[in-house]
Structure formats: C-alpha cells, structure tokens
Image (cartoon, coloured by chain):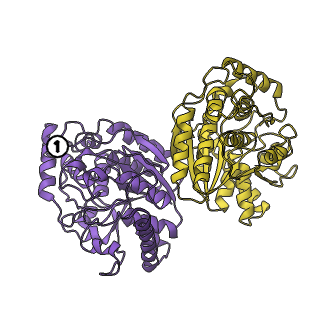
Chain colours: A purple, B yellow
Amino acid sequence: VTFVLVAGSTETAAIDGISAAGETPATMAHTPAADAEIVAYGRPVFAPIVPVSPAGCPTPGVVTRAVRDLVEFDLVVADAGMAGETAAPTVAFGDEPGGDIRSPEPVAEAGAIRESARAFAAAHPDDELVIGETIPGGTTTAMGVLRALGESYGVSSSLPANPLDLKREVVADALAASDLAAGDLDGQPTEAIRRAGDPTLAASLGLLEGALERGASVTLAGGSQMLAVAALARHAGVTERFEIATTSFVAADDGVGIRAAADALDISLQVTDPEFEPGEHVATDHYLDGVAKEGVGMGGALRLAESAGVPKSAVKERLFERYGALVEDNGV
Amino acid sequence: VTFVLVAGSTETAAIDGISAAGETPATMAHTPAADAEIVAYGRPVFAPIVPVSPAGCPTPGVVTRAVRDLVEFDLVVADAGMAGETAAPTVAFGDEPGGDIRSPEPVAEAGAIRESARAFAAAHPDDELVIGETIPGGTTTAMGVLRALGESYGVSSSLPANPLDLKREVVADALAASDLAAGDLDGQPTEAIRRAGDPTLAASLGLLEGALERGASVTLAGGSQMLAVAALARHAGVTERFEIATTSFVAADDGVGIRAAADALDISLQVTDPEFEPGEHVATDHYLDGVAKEGVGMGGALRLAESAGVPKSAVKERLFERYGALVEDNGV
C-alpha cells in the first residue's frame, strides 16, 4: 500500500472563520507542511508549528503517523501548491498555492496539475493507493467545485459549529466571480477546479484517474473533500468503482450525508470509529466535541490499521505517545 | 536509520570516456532519477531507462533496493541538481545540474546547497543517517575537489579500466579554468566545490555537518566521492568521527587506497563483501569484472543488511528477483 498525502494551500483559508486547521491564520499557512513532516518524520522539521485548532485540538496527522508506526505502508507526499517550506520529501504537481475562490481563476494550473498527477499514478507500481489531503479551507473549496458541477452534497467542517452560511456565501461569490450559476460546469471537472476549487482537488483527481486506468485499487481517505474528488471523477467520466474511507466523526455529520452521497456516486464507503472515549485524553476529547473530525488521511489510516488487525487500543496508545512527544518538543 | 540518497548531475559526465554510469551519454542524464525511483519504488517510473553500464552492468541501485526489501529504513531522496524528471519524492537542495568542471564556476550554488542540506540534517529527528549518492561523473568531480583542497587521495571508477589519465587532465583543466594550483583551496571546502566539484558534494557535506552537530551518527555510503566528502568535512573543521561504508570492490582498488585515506582522515571504514560468485548471475558477474564497484549507497546498504543479520544469500536472492523484474519490465 502507498499512502499519498496531497498537501496544498488555498488563500480561501484566510477568510475569517472558515477553517480550524490552524491556531491563527498566520500559523495555518504552515499546516500542510507540518502535517507532511509529522507523517514523514514524526514531528515538524522545517515547519515552525505543530498544527492545532484554535481550541488546541492536534492535527489528525498525528493519528495517521501513529498508524504508520504500527502498519507498514509507503508514503508519498504530493506537493500541490504548499505555501510553507517543508522538509518532507515531495513529488511536486503544482507550484503555487490556490487563490481565493472569490477571484475568477483561483487554480490557473488545474489542468496541468491533474495531468501530472495522472501520469504519476499511471506509472506508479503499487496496486493499492490511499489518497489523503491536508489543506486548510478545503471543505469550502470542495463546496465550490460541487456547486459548480451542480452537485448538492453537503460539506463538513473542522469546527464543531460548521460555518455553513459563511461557506455558502463564499461559494456564491466564487461562482459569481466567474459568471457561473450552480451546475454550469456539469461534466467539466478541470474547469470547476480552475474556477472554484483548490490545487489538491486537481492532484487528487489526477491520482485517482491514473491509478484506476491501470487497474489499481484506490481509497480516497477523507470526508467532504474526497467526496468532491469522487464527484469530479464521475463528472470526468470515470466509471470504475473505488472507495472512500472516512472517520465516524464525518459519518455522523448530518450536514454531509456521506452515506447517501457515496451511494449516489456508486462508491464504497468505509467508516472507521477510532473508539475515542470521553475523558480519556486531551488529544482525543476535542474529536468527541466535533473538532477536526478527519484530515491527513485519518480515516484511511484507521482503516489500514483495522485491516492489518491492529487493535484500536494500540492505535490510541501510540497516538498518545506521539502526541506527548510533540507537546514535549514544541510546547503545544 | 534514514538513508539519504543524494542525486544530482554534472556536465562533467558528458566528457567522452569519463563515466560508465549509463549506456550512452544521452541515457546517463537519466541515471540519478532512475536510481532514485528504483530505490523508492523498485523500478523506473518517469525515468525512461534502467541504468546500465555500456557493458550492461545494472546500477548498484538495484542492490540498495534489494536490501530495502529486507531491512526497514526510511528513505529520503535529496535532489542536488538532478537533470532528468523523477517521480521519487525529493527534498530539493539544488535547482541546477553542475557545470563542466573545466568551466570557472561549475557549482555557483555550492554555499546555498551546503547550507540548506545542513539545516535539514540538523533538524531531522533520526539519530542515524546513511548518506549515499548517484551522480555520473562523480569520481572526476571528487578528484577535482580533492586536488583543489591539496589532498592526493586516489579515486575509483565505474569502469574496469579507470581512465585516470583522462581524469587528471580534466582536473588540471578545471583548476586552470579557475586560476588555481593544487592545494590553493586548502581549508575552503565550499570554494573547492564551487570551482571544481558537483552539487552532490555540497549537499553531502551539509548533511554530514548538520547531523554531526546535533550528535547523530553518520555513515557515508560510497567510495571515492564519499572520501572527498570526508576530506571536505575535515577541511571545514569538522572534528567528530564518522564512518565510511563501502564495498569490497572499492576497497580492492589500489588506485584509491581507501583504507589508508580513512586512517589519515580519522574515519572508521566499514568494508562489506557482497560475496558475489563467478558465473552465479549476469547481474553480478560484471562487478567481479570491476564494473560499477559501488554507488547509490550500495556499500552502506550491504552494511545495514549485515548489521540486521540478513545473510548475503538472502540479499543476492532478492537482488536477482529485482533484477529479473527490471529486465522483464524494461528489456535491459
């Protein structure tokens, strides 16, 4: 199994109140680089922060890293427009962070990113790819492409109170900036990303397409954003079945309705409950309060652990150790 | 253990007769990218070739990859001016291939490459780094910096008949192009690389320095080029002990005299004999004829296998399987 972590940025994340993938907007710019380093090396190396939400919830990247300590898988970090410098080894598909989707062309490179990711996955030798993402603001850009495509699926949030009104407003402005009505880009996935998405969506779509075209199995590891990637693939004419693996926190979010969406898109949905228990640990209590929910491939990583027969208790034990080491190193 | 493969290019390799790290000069440009992909993925992905010598000897990268199948270690590919596109995830320390050392400034970026590699290794969490290289023409650039520093150590060759007269002539021209006499850059390692070296030497030196300054243990995995890196470190004032791990093929090369050189530089030398036997396999017979000898961290990988208690026979078995798969895929 190869886990591909697609890391990127969008200026959309800087809109006040849109994302919890960072303590402040300034630190949020480093979240993708830090997540990549945590999964690759166990802790930030060049990134100056450990990503936490404003409330102090540690990045789900720590869960993915904890699983990586217990289950063998290869890691590829795909750079799809990361803003901050990273010490993680990367394959670069995009050079530039995505722009604010309220501008006319937030992802000018969408076609090139999709194609280079497709070529990579088509040539990659592993029969099994798991694709995760880290991009603050990603649920808003996911909503942007879904509406441009004419899909009405909901999106989740890394905040306990999903700022859905704000997201709808931002997406309405995004479509207006490109003179589009919802559904105008039905069947035009690259165009939907170029006008209303972010670079990680282009890279994830290309990876999915390239792997499927050579008969590999693909798991999209995530929530709303991976649902958007799945919708983009169907709009691209991809007919093969593939899988979405997500957490029980996303599955429990009625605003998304991921089960119904997966059915409608003809996708297998795997939901894994990490069995966090109230009061067990400060690192996991936030999740029970609805913070973070998913990200950095957390649902896919939990699924890999389950498939390998690793007990939930072992994942949690490792997670608490990893979290403890991060707190010690960086004073989270 | 983290194995850092420093991959780069130098136009010096295009000098007729200087290197065997490619079937032809045109394919040689892809050797570092292909080596990185073979170690990362088991076979070339974007690189259009499997590196073989003109006589058909497969790259020592296949040995390193075979060991990676048997011994767990993390891999980081350091891009120090690779010429060809690679699908391997990389940390980039240099943007440009090195120039022909017969020009005045073949590695204009030497200082910046050394510093970014140093910063990376200083921040990396692993206590044990193994540093290998892949750069066609690298023994000639190694000789260039050794002479600029005033060191008279010999260098090996990937060819059975080392074209030493040609290398000496190229190095003499290199020094002349910078108005230098041998030894003029005593104590000036960056300057020696900038005037007569290649980008992988700058990256390897920086990695060594950064890891040693935080007390990590470092093994330079290779022959002549790693000897040059060791000399550069001593000229940089590095006093800590570290290790060179190389193959018995390099150790048997009297033109190098690596044992005496290691003693003079106060470096532990680990020599590993892969126990290839005549007539055993086409992939290994070339080595017994003096082709390749070392490269892509082969000596360090063999050492890791030995330390992990993996028998030589298991390494060879895996090597023959990997070689067979490459032949099947790419018609080597």
Q: Name the side, left or right, on which B133 lies relative to B261.
A: left
**Could you tell me which quadrant the C terminus of chain A lies in?**
bottom left
Frontmost residue, A187 versus A201: A201
Q: Taking the image as drawn, is residue B29 in sight?
A: no
Residue at image x 13%, y 53%? A168
The mark tally for this picture is 1
Q: Name the side, left or right, on which A195 lies relative to A182.
A: right
Frontmost residue, A228 versus B155: B155
Residue at image x 25%, y 39%? A106
Q: Quick check: A240 above or below A203?
A: below
Image coords of residue B317 (percent x, y): 75, 58
Quarter holding residue B171: top right
Image coords of residue B60 (percent x, y): 72, 46
Image coords of residue B259 (percent x, y): 83, 47
Q: Quick check: A62 above or below B198?
A: below
Residue at image x 12%, y 47%? A172
Residue corresponding to mark 1: A174
Amino acid type of the residue that numbered disc 1 sits on in the rendered structure: Ala
Q: Name the side, left or right, on which A311 lies relative to A174.
A: right
